[in-house]
Amino acid sequence: MTFRKSRTFTEGELEFMKVLWSLGEATPDEVQSALQDQGRSLTHGTIRNVLVVMIEKGYVTRTKKGKAYLYKAKVSEVQAKKSMLQDLIDRAFNGSESHMIATLLNGKEIRTNEREKIRRLIDEVKKEKE
């Protein structure tokens, strides 16, 4: 079965990707152990099946090392976050970054330190563009 590559991960796929990003590469047993540490109990067969689907979607690569397969993220964490954020902006905010930021700023109380970080980031981007 061939899977269509989505612009974003499912919730479960994102859990797997976070494990692979943190470990660099891992066997299915290592993925299973890391997920169990996070309170997620999946069978070995389920772990393997999800990894195979993620290979078919182009998110993960697999190499054979001895008797085991090692799985590695094909998509970097930064690249994935940019893609997920752009998908959210496109779908929820009709492509408007300013609408997304306005919603974020008006939607909840942002801690002072976070607000300052946002302000510094905006200032840095302004300086880079000048």
Image (tube, rainbow, N blue to C red):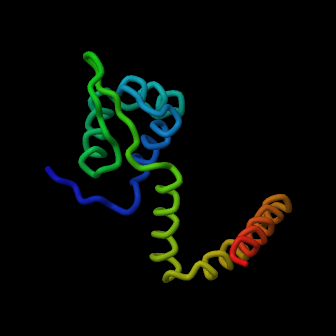
Q: Residue at x 45, y 48 (%)?
A: 14
Using residue 21 as the reference point, say whether residue 2 is left or right of it.
Answer: left
5 is higher (above) or lower (below) than 39: below
* Residue at the limit of the structure toward the left, as seen here: 1
Using residue 47 as the reference point, say whether residue 32 is left or right of it.
Answer: right
State the image quarter where residue 44 is shown.
top left
Front in this rendered view, residue 3 or 12: 3
Residue 41, image x and y in percent? 42, 31
State the image quarter where residue 124 is shown.
bottom right
* Residue at the limit of the structure toward the front, as seen here: 130
* Residue at the limit of the structure toward the top, as seen here: 66
Residue 63, image x and y in percent? 29, 30
19 is higher (above) or lower (below) than 10: above
Using residue 103 as the reference point, say whether residue 54 is left or right of it.
Answer: left
Q: Residue at x 35, y 48 (%)?
A: 59
- Tally of numbered tags: 0
Q: Residue at x 47, y 77 (%)?
A: 90
Residue 65, image x and y in percent? 30, 21
Residue 9, image x and y in percent? 40, 55
Q: Residue at x 74, y 75 (%)?
A: 126
* Residue at the limit of the structure toward the right, as seen here: 112
User: In which quadrant is the C terminus drawn?
Assistant: bottom right
42 is higher (above) or lower (below) than 95: above
Front in this rendered view, residue 59 or 12: 59
